[in-house]
């Protein structure tokens, strides 16, 4: 999103214009792509005391505009801190993403003065009325990031996980890893409930049934890696290859899988990241008022 200074009757701090005789504003953006989620870390660099004072007083804030014209995605991130972050599903993005940062008013500001105003353009002791949402500063850098949209990780993983009904009075869950697919075995009552709710409560089903199975698979991959002669032979199964490819695409090797809950690549945490943190979405599904109707039926 590019703004033209010439559309405003008041001074804007902008490196392309001389409305201010001193001061600067810019942002630094770092990006990270992992398991189908695109994370932006934004640091704001404001060197203008009066604008910084407005932010501190709650009259203004930093604002970052993120836009992908190909998909029509547009998002605004507000912050009163000098840094913030945002995570976006890659399914929302494709090709180029433009990122611009601003300082904007969040309240009407009467009689706004700043000693850094250029007197040649606005006169001595100039003051202005600023409306809420007016732009007060434009970041010097507009970022253009290239997004290569690939296959979503959970779709690949989903191809090698199969839920199977078995005749059993027990309500436990058994995971079989000795075939090309990961087979999750449950009794028929559980299977029927899964079949009923797998669309409406997708993330609840993932959290309850799929996540434990994937975690077990990751643990067995770790154990297999620790076996010097590789006698377990898990690498020959299709599920192993798919999970390995998914990890590799995100900069993680099978050797990085850990059984320590405190490690970044702990098996349980990796399973959550592969499925894009389904627990919160599962809780939101359970809070859906339609759940009670489904239960009554």
Image (tube, rainbow, N blue to C red):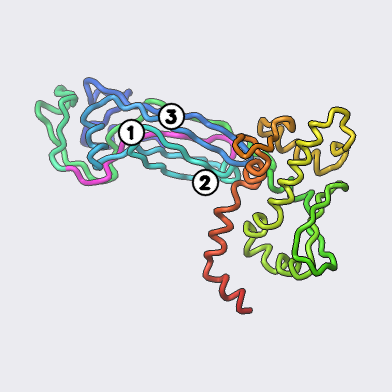
Mark 1 or 2, closer to the camera: 2
Q: Check the image and name the residue furthest to the bottom.
A: 297
* Residue 191 quadrant: bottom right
Q: Residue at 40% across / 28% down in the picture?
A: 27
User: Closest to the observer: 234 or 104?
Assistant: 234
Residue 33 pos. (x, y %): 59, 35
Tags 1 and 2 touching, CB below 8 Å? no
* Residue 256 quadrant: top right
Q: Which mark is residue 252?
A: none
> Could you classify mark 2 by the number of other residues whose Cα lies within 10 Å: few (under 14), some (14-19), or many (20 or more)?
few
Q: Which mark is residue 72?
A: 2
Quarter in which the N terminus is drawn: top left
Q: Does 110 sit left or right of 195 as displayed?
A: left
Residue 4 pos. (x, y %): 33, 33
Q: Does 169 sit left or right of 49 as displayed?
A: right
Q: Residue at 78% across / 41% down in the picture?
A: 220
Magenta segment, prevailing SS (helix, strand or loop): strand
Q: Check the image and name the residue furthest to the left.
A: 124
- Say if 284 sits above or below 47 in the image: below
CA gap, disc 1 and disc 2? 22 Å
Stretch in magenta: 94-109
- Disc 1 secondary structure class: loop
> Could you classify mark 1 by the number of other residues whose Cα lies within 10 Å: few (under 14), some (14-19), or many (20 or more)?
few
Q: Which mark is residue 142?
A: 3
- Mark sitting earlier along the chain (1/2): 1
Tags 3 and 2 touching, CB below 8 Å? no
Q: Which mark is residue 4?
A: 1
Q: Check the image and name the residue furthest to the top.
A: 22
Residue 100 colored magenta? yes
- Mark sitting earlier along the chain (3/1): 1
Residue 77 colored magenta? no
């Amino acid at each position: 999103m590019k703004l033209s200074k010439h559309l405003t009757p008041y001074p804007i701090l902008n490196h392309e214009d001389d409305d201010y005789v001193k001061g600067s504003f810019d942002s630094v953006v770092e990006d990270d792509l992992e398991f189908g989620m695109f994370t932006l870390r934004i640091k704001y660099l404001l060197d203008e005391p009066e604008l910084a004072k407005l932010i501190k007083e709650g009259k203004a804030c930093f604002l970052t505009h993120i836009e992908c014209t190909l998909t029509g995605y547009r998002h605004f991130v507000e912050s009163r801190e000098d840094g913030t972050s945002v995570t976006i599903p890659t399914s929302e993005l494709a090709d180029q993403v433009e990122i611009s940062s601003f300082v904007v008013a969040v309240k009407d500001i009467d009689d706004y003065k700043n000693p850094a105003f250029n007197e040649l353009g606005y006169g001595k002791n100039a003051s202005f009325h600023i409306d809420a949402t007016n732009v007060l500063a434009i970041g010097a850098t507009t970022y253009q990031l290239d997004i290569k949209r690939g296959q979503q990780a959970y779709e690949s993983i989903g191809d090698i996980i199969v839920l199977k009904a078995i005749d059993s009075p027990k309500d436990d869950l058994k995971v079989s890893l000795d075939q090309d697919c990961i087979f999750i075995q449950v009794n028929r009552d559980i299977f029927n409930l899964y079949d009923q709710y797998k669309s409406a409560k997708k993330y609840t089903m993932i959290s309850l049934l799929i996540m434990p199975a994937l975690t077990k698979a990751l643990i067995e991959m770790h154990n297999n890696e620790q076996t010097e002669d590789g006698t377990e032979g898990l690498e020959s199964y299709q599920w192993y290859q798919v999970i390995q490819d998914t990890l590799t695409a995100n900069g993680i090797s099978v050797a990085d899988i850990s059984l320590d809950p405190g490690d970044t690549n702990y098996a349980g945490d990796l399973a959550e990241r592969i499925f894009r943190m389904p627990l919160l979405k599962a809780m939101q599904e359970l809070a859906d008022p339609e759940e009670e109707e489904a239960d009554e039926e």
